[in-house]
Amino acid sequence: MDGKVPMTREGNRALKEELRRLKTEERPKIIDEIATAREHGDLSENAEYDAAREKQSLIEGRIREIEDKLSRADVIDTPEGETDKVVFGTVVHLRDENNGDELTYRIVGADEADPQEKKISIYSPIARALIGKEVDDLVKVKVPAGIREYTILGIGL
């Protein structure tokens, strides 16, 4: 995969921690599980062995994926102090003009996105529409259900 992977400092730390855990805890544990399963005899009919090998494959795949992302990481520091424009890493307070709801999102890298924590990917339609905008701007976002309109109520860090 080519190109830089934008992420916040926190997202970079989280990926490094996951990589550390996979390499130092999960990998040795699965190696032990495979060794134990081998001791049970015929591998051709050993469901424990097959399950452990499948798990090992998933862990190794995730390790490669994280190492790739970290090698291409573009760690973007959020601005210090006040900012008057929406940028990567900022928290944006919005009013949905379609229904009056107030929403708050933090714009983060794709791997950090978590809708339940109100973190949206920089690549999402709403984040792309918000970047560079200021408080009181009306932002129109094309979504599968049509056009949504949001007013920016505040920008924070």
Image (spheres, rainbow, N blue to C red):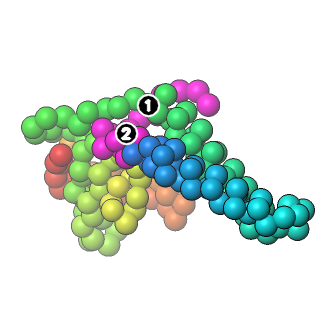
Q: Is residue 20 visible?
A: yes
Q: Residues within 10 Å of mark 1 (few under 14, many from 20)?
A: some
Q: Residue at x 26, y 71 (%)?
A: 100
Q: Is residue 12 left or right of residue 58?
A: left
Element on which disc 1 rests:
strand
Residue 73 disc label: 1
Q: Are marks 2 and 1 in contact (CB under 8 Å)?
A: yes
**Residue 138, image x, y percentages:** 27, 51
Q: Earlier in the sequence, mark 2 or mark 1?
A: 2
Q: Residue at x 79, y 67 (%)?
A: 40
Which quadrant holds residue 81?
A: top left
Q: Residue at x 40, y 62 (%)?
A: 115
Tell me the residue that label 2 is attached to: 12
Q: Is residue 48 left or right of residue 124?
A: right
Q: Is residue 109 visible?
A: no
**As rendered, which of 56 and 72 lies closer to the eye?**
56
Please identify the quadrant where the N terminus is shown: top right
**Residue 116, image x, y percentages:** 37, 66
Question: Please, what is the three-letter code of the amino acid marked with disc 1?
Answer: Ala
**Residue 3 in magenta stretch:** yes
Element on which disc 2 rests:
helix
Q: Residue at x 37, y 39 (%)?
A: 12
Residue 7 disc label: none
How many tags in the picture? 2
**As rendered, which of 151 and 79 lies closer to the eye?**
79
Q: Which residues are magenta?
A: 1-16
**As rendered, which of 19 and 66 lies closer to the eye?**
19
The answer to whether 82 is drawn above or below residue 155 in the figure is above
Q: Residues within 10 Å of mark 2 (few under 14, many from 20)?
A: many
Question: Please, what is the three-letter code of the amino acid marked with disc 2?
Answer: Asn
